[in-house]
Amino acid sequence: MTAPKPFDRPPGSALAGGTAGPGALQPLVAEVLAALRRGAARRGGPLPPGGPAAVAERLRALLAPSALLPEQGDPGALEALVEALAATAADPADPACAAHLHVPPLAVAVAAELATAAVNPSLDSWDQAPGSTSVELAVVRALAGLVGFARPEAAAGVLTGGGTESNLMALLLARDAFPREQFASGRLTVHCSQAAHFSIARGAALLGLDRDAVVPVQTAPDGRMDPRVLDWALADARAAGRVPCCVVATAGTTDLGAVDPLAAVAAVARRHRVRLHVDAAYGGGALFSRRLAPLLDGLSEADTIGLDLHKLGWQPIAAGVLLVREAVMFAPLEQRAAYLNPEDDEDAGYTSLLGRSLRTTRRADAFKVAVTLRTLGRAGLGALVDRCHDLAGYAAERIAAEPRLELTAEPVLTTVLFRYLPQRGAAAGAETDRVNAALRRRLLEQGSAVVGRTELGSGPGSVRLKLTLLNPGTSTAELDRLIELVLAAGADSEPPDADEQRETNS
Ligand SMILES: *Cc1c(COP(=O)(O)O)cnc(C)c1O
């Protein structure tokens, strides 16, 4: 037998765990923090200026194949790449970065994430995550209480990669509550509002449901599902020999923040004996706020609920949660793997969470959530939610008062939909759409603001701009400035003759 040669550790190969890990991490973390500061300063705004070509050019040398995978390692890589990461980021901590459900994460949650990464638990088996298994179970229990399940101790849940995965899993659990033949017959249907997230349709397709299995329920002009229309749709499906397997309500649509009337929808689902999933990826965070929680009345009637704490929860990505009313609802996902969760281990109390997820290796995302919930408490998180709601109200008032801007709807949660009205073409929808699209790209190109853009309905005149206000540190003066930027970019995006016209008018 020949012993291997003594090991010469290559530079940069220190480990993060154990008692020596913190010592190895300390100088690296200091380097990261300094590079983050330099990168943010270099960027100097919400995103790097110049558009995609300029960003790609700034990164070209750093990311060239010979630089990215050199024969001999480069000890300066961490510093150089972190600085570039920050310098080329769209930073949701900047008040002018307000397009998406893309939050500035809490520092305490990011610090907790560092600890999770260093310890590196994996939730597929108890022996990879002894304490982290308890943490996830406890976080799920706390959230089951927050959503108001009648018997939180009977509930269960799992951390997911986000609303997309939560929705897919909820549909899978609903589908597999039916005998295989029903599914194979192609008769199962899913009923959600027209404004439901696209991941519902994609999830249904992934699960092999029929192409027309997802039946969209018409929404009222406020973007909410009409429970009477749902009632008819369920009756129609049954009359046509189909089998409704799930009603999906949305608590907080991505654009309008509309919350379906959950109690009424739950009553309809119950009457038809159909499972109810609530996609509360966005709106679920309103539960932290005493003021906004009543919007979600009826949520506790759901069978399954998706929450995204990387939205109104200020977690670094990802912190999705799927909750189920009764733990037995996870039965379709049960999985026995001899090398992960042998039955005698389970019987002896070594509980593995493998059977609650579509994944095998799984991050301990519950840890940062646990730290956050305990650090801020419900009141602390509620104050952040309320602040963002207040900012949305302020922005809506400012927009409504601007003659060149048109407010689309009063905000429900923290989004504000509006559009710029060009001098000319306000009547011609297509020109208004063009100017709004162009002004948004102009702001991106300048690196001055990240404003959302969406469409309300379809056809000419449907383009809208969107502010998704998720930064509780934003001041009203900063919102004023953001609106000024939109107005200036709008004026600059109008055809030159419109400018002349305005000059002669004034
Ligand atoms: C964000 C969102 C999703 C998708 O969630 P991800 O975390 O991006 O996967 C689904 N539904 C709603 C209502 C959302 O707001």
Image (cartoon, rainbow, N blue to C red):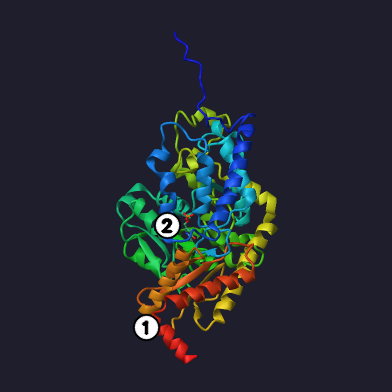
**Structural crowding at the residue carrying mark 2, measured as other residues with C-alpha within 10 Å and reported as few (<14), some (14–19) or many (≥20):** some
From the viewer's side, name the closer residue of 323 and 67.
Answer: 67
**Image side of residue 382 versus residue 172, left or right:** right
Residue at point 49%, 54% (across, down): 88
Q: Position of residue 503 (x, y in %)?
A: 46, 87
At label 1, which amino acid type do we have? Answer: Ala
| Quadrant where the image shows the N terminus | top left
**Separation of disc 1 and disc 2 at Cα?**
34 Å
Rendered image: mark on residue 54: 2
The quadrant in which residue 23 appears is top right
From the viewer's side, name the closer residue of 217 and 447.
Answer: 447
Q: Which residue is mark 1?
A: 428
Residue 467 visible to an observer of this rendering: yes
**Image side of residue 199 versus residue 298, left or right:** left
Task: Identify the element where label 1 is drawn.
Answer: loop
Q: Quick one: label 1 or label 2, which is nearer the N terminus?
A: 2
Image vertical order of residue 305 relative to residue 71, above or below: below
Task: Identify the element where label 2 is drawn.
Answer: helix
Q: Position of residue 282 (x, y in %)?
A: 53, 60
Image vertical order of residue 410 relative to residue 93, above or below: below
Q: Position of residue 338 (x, y in %)?
A: 45, 28
From the viewer's side, name the closer residue of 142 and 448.
Answer: 448
**Image side of residue 43 versus residue 26, left or right:** left
Which residue extends farthest top?
1
Residue at point 50%, 75% (across, down): 488
**Structural crowding at the residue carrying mark 1, measured as other residues with C-alpha within 10 Å and reported as few (<14), some (14–19) or many (≥20):** few
At label 2, which amino acid type do we have? Answer: Ala
Residue at point 46%, 78% (across, down): 491
